[in-house]
Amino acid sequence: MAERVAIFPAGRQDIYARYRYSAAVASGGFLFISGQVGSREDGSPEPDPEAQLRLAFQNLDAVLAAAGCDFGDVVDFTVFIVDPEPLLPVFGKVRDEFWGPAPWPTLTAIGVTWLSGFRFELKATARLREGNDNNG
């Protein structure tokens, strides 16, 4: 059985401890990342949708970096969007700032009715780079 190693970005462990989950888990050569939202340092939502999404990507980048990865290592990506019709173009614009060149990861976009005050949530799976299976 593959070992599970919890990964946390610097300075945000208290938010994950409060809600009892890991930012990511490294296991079996992959990094499974919990949904990242556009939360400020205190955990509250950034009110502007575009700024909120940009912050969600920055939070995702921080989790990837904590595991020795970057967005080029992401193989599967899911975005949850409250009221997706008007916000999908916002996603496309901000996504392009972070994704880099092809090949891009797989993408699933899901419209939802509630994200606890947030408009977007980003979930990803990345491959771990060789030698990074036991980050913590």
Image (spheres, rainbow, N blue to C red):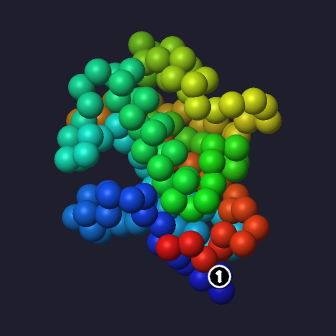
Locate the N terminus and report the quarter of the image it occupies: bottom right
The answer to which of 90 and 116 lies nearer the viewer is 90
Q: Is residue 42 above or below residue 28?
A: above
Q: In the rendered image, which quarter is residue 54 located in?
A: top left
Q: In the rendered image, which quarter is residue 65 located in?
A: bottom right
Residue 76: where, in percent of width, then height? Answer: 65, 47
Q: Is residue 86 above or below residue 79?
A: above
In the rendered image, is residue 112 in sight?
no
User: Which type of secondary structure does the marked residue at label 1 adopt?
Assistant: loop
Q: Which residue is mark 1?
A: 2
Tell me which amino acid carries mark 1: Ala
Q: Is residue 85 above or below residue 107?
A: above
Residue 98: where, in percent of width, then height? Answer: 58, 31
Residue 107: where, in percent of width, then height? Answer: 64, 36
Q: Residue furthest right?
A: 103
Residue 102: where, in percent of width, then height? Answer: 78, 31
Q: Is residue 96 left or right of residue 13?
A: right
In the rendered image, is residue 25 in sight?
yes
